[in-house]
Image (spheres, rainbow, N blue to C red):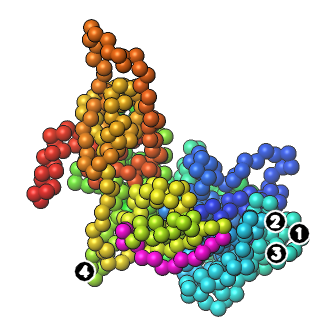
Amino acid sequence: MKKIKNIAIIAHVDHGKTTLIDAALKQAGVFRENQKVAERVMDSTDLERERGITIFSKNAAISYGDYKINIVDTPGHADFGGEVQRILKMVDSVLLLVDAFEGPMPQTKYVLKKSLEQGLHPVVVINKIDRPNARPDEVLNDVFDLFVELNADESQLDFPVIYASAKEGIARYELDDTNIDLKPLFETIIKHVKEPEGDVSGTLQFFTSAISYDSYIGKIGTGKIHNGSIKQGQEVMLLKKNGESVLYKVTRVFVYNGLKRDSVKEAFAGDIVSLAGLETIDVGETVSDKENPMPLPSIDIDEPTLAMTFLVNDSPFAGNEGKYVTSRHVWERLQKELLTNVSLRVEETGTKNAFMVKGRGALQLSILIENMRREGYEFQVSKPEVILKYIDDEKCEPMELAVIDVAEEFSGVVIEMFGQRKGELKNMISGTSGYTRLEFHIPSRSLIGFNNELLTSTRGTAILNHSFNGYEPYKGEMRRKTKGVLIALEPGTSVAFGLFNLQERGTLFLGPGIPVYAGMIVGEHCKENDLVVNPCKTKKLTNMRSSGADEAVRLTPPRQFSLEQALEYIEDDELLEITPRNIRMRKKFLDINDRKRAEKLKKAG
């Protein structure tokens, strides 16, 4: 049996975690010399490859000398913090990656805080040392300050440091070393990551940190064996979170070898394994000995901060494009998502056709929506709203730590924009290359729909990163979007003539030849009020030809929205219609008279 080291790679988004694992797998001989390997091989889903981000935590293992190193790749985006939290019980240390130019970012602080709370001793990797304007020494000082800020103890402050370029596959003890491999990184892991605790001869205790599915063997629970050993065919007791105990037989035991899962007869304490045959196993549950069951403490996942209503599609185009359209279909799919997504909550509402979905951020919810539409689901969603809490009888709201890197000449514009949204400037650092870094403490609701406006006002030079930073007393009302929308008057197909006449009224969201229905949003009005228009209006034929009859109609290209942009754009009285082929914005009340009635009731109430 090989000695084992269990480690997770944590960092802010795009600091190079998955690229470093790619290099480690290649240098550890996981792939054949002539094997064609995809870039970011750990990002295995379509959405991860398209967006270039890690969404789900994944396992791999490499052999180095007498050791087996189990590596867990984690997401870097703040919305997927639950994925990071659930795997920290599976590992004995973390590699904290920090960009040698950007330094510690909001998510760096979040993931480091969680690992320090677990008592882990991080190994710090200053990555991208080959990047232009890299400042590794300054970044190392910033990392040390962050450890101090997060109340790290003396042993945690004495962290080992490695300088790396994940892209080049290089890790060094000192910046001026000349080696061209990752050997220093492997050696540091062997030397500084503690051995897994646990008694091989003790009572079996396996803690589930992840769930996956296999069409042949069913549900698979992945986690760490904290004590004892487990064999294929062994009868075990599954200790559920609700206090229930269920007897099961383990049909398969898998260990990780490179990126593959290998079936074994027996696995021992300290190793990360996957178990099949436990049909009702969920994240945070313990598998133990059937004679002497002993549960492990469950994981505490941070509560959701954002909520969104998922509704059955009731537009005139309902059922034309989707395969799964009923409330039962939507409910079952959301329940299935709960099995693997530990930071998501799904609740029934007062009506049978609407469900409340709570998550950690707009990106997390948009990933769920995108996956559902690709699977053939058709539904509607409301505007995201923050979840308010009452703490000691005081109304409180979620706050964010926001970091903006922006061209120097726009720093005043950004400070003004954040000030209007109840943002409080905490720090301002003049960076290199004419950029300034601004740090704000701001309500989460202020950032919904803000990114587009920020990019427009700074001519695309602003880069915004933010992460949840606790609850604080409610900051009061704030002004929202200043422009109204153009709403279709009647059903039909948009025509160039009708759209041409609307161009002076605002910005169009569609071109000619697009089916529309009454109440559908077709553009943005140049004024504050909503305006009902007719994009389907055609030119009337007469027996007299006007002088401009044959003039070509010139249309400005319509404004296109991604799913995230559309979610941020809609208002409280609007919905987003999601189908496998289209994303449409619409009013909640399609009929103009219903909208007027609702507006009167709102003013009266």
SS label for mark 3: loop
Marks 1 and 2 in Cβ contact (< 8 Å): yes
Q: Which residue is mark 4?
A: 393
Which quarter shows the C terminus? bottom left
Mark 4 to mark 2 CA distance (whole Å): 54 Å
Whole-number angstrom distance, CA of label 3 to CA of label 2 = 11 Å
Of the two numbered discs 4 and 3 in the rendering, the one whose residue sits closer to the viewer: 3
Q: Spatial distance from mark 1 to mark 2, Cα to Cα? A: 7 Å
Task: Please check the rendered image and state whether residue 154 is part of the magenta-colored stretch, yes or no.
Answer: no
Q: Amino acid at mark 4?
A: Asp
- Tag 2, which secondary structure? strand
Locate residue 164: give its quadrant. bottom right
Q: Is residue 26 above or below residue 176?
A: above
Residue matched to label 3: 175
Q: Is residue 63 visible?
A: no
**Label 1: how many residues lie within 10 Å, few (<14), some (14-19) or many (20+)?**
few
* Residue 255 at x, y percent in the picture: 69, 60
* Residue named by callout 1: 179
Q: Which residues are magenta?
A: 420-432
For mark 2, what is the residue? 170
State which tag comes first along the sequence, 4 or 3: 3
